[in-house]
Image (tube, helix red, strand yellow):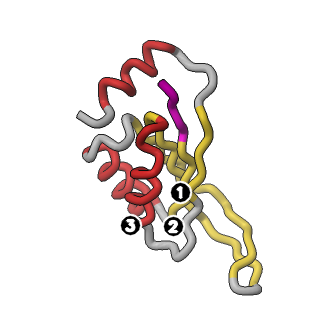
Amino acid sequence: MSYRTFYVTTKNETEALEIAETLVNERLVACANLIPGMKSIYRWHGRLEHNQETVLLLKTKDSQAEKVVARISELHSYTVPCIVSWEIKEANQKYLQWIDSEIGK
């Protein structure tokens, strides 16, 4: 069984909370962590942008990855949201078992 952590940036804590609660309630992710107050600097439509954002860290099974990306894309306010993930290589096995118990019921 493989597991993933998703990294998603959102416009604010309210949007992050709405996405997190939806994904947990729909059992697409087992856990969501919100990190408010991140400063982002990027170029958008030829202009340098500086914004405060909230980061979401989401833990799920690899088998849910496509559904997670699709659902976040539906819920997100950005035209091009940052939705990236990486495989969890090492972890507390009891934590991974807990993820198993929470996903897709």
How many C-alpha atoms fall within 10 Å of the one at disc 2: few (<14), some, or many (≥20)?
Answer: some
**Gap in Å between the C-alphas at discs 2 and 3?**
15 Å
Residue beneath disc 2: 11
Is 84 left or right of 96, judged from the image as shown?
Answer: right
How many C-alpha atoms fall within 10 Å of the one at disc 3: few (<14), some, or many (≥20)?
Answer: few
Q: Nearer the viewer, mark 1 or mark 3?
A: 3
> Where residue 96 sits in the image (x, y, percent)?
45, 21
Residue beneath disc 3: 74
Query: For the residue labelled by badge 1, is the local secondary structure a helix, a strand or a loop?
Result: strand
The front one of 23 and 55 is 23
The front one of 15 and 25 is 25
Q: Which label number is shown at residue 15? A: none
Is 81 left or right of 41, judged from the image as shown?
Answer: left
Look at the image and give the residue range highlighted in magenta: 1-5
Which residue type carries mark 3? Glu
68 relative to 43, above or below? above
Which residue is rendered at x = 38% and y = 40% of the image?
29
Residue beneath disc 1: 54
Which residue is rendered at x = 37% and y = 21% of the image?
98
**Gap in Å between the C-alphas at discs 2 and 1?**
6 Å
Q: Which of the two discs, 2 and 3, labels the residue nearer the N terminus?
A: 2
- What is the magenta segment's predominant secondary structure? strand
> Where residue 67 sits in the image (x, y, percent)?
40, 51
Corner quadrant of residue 63: top left
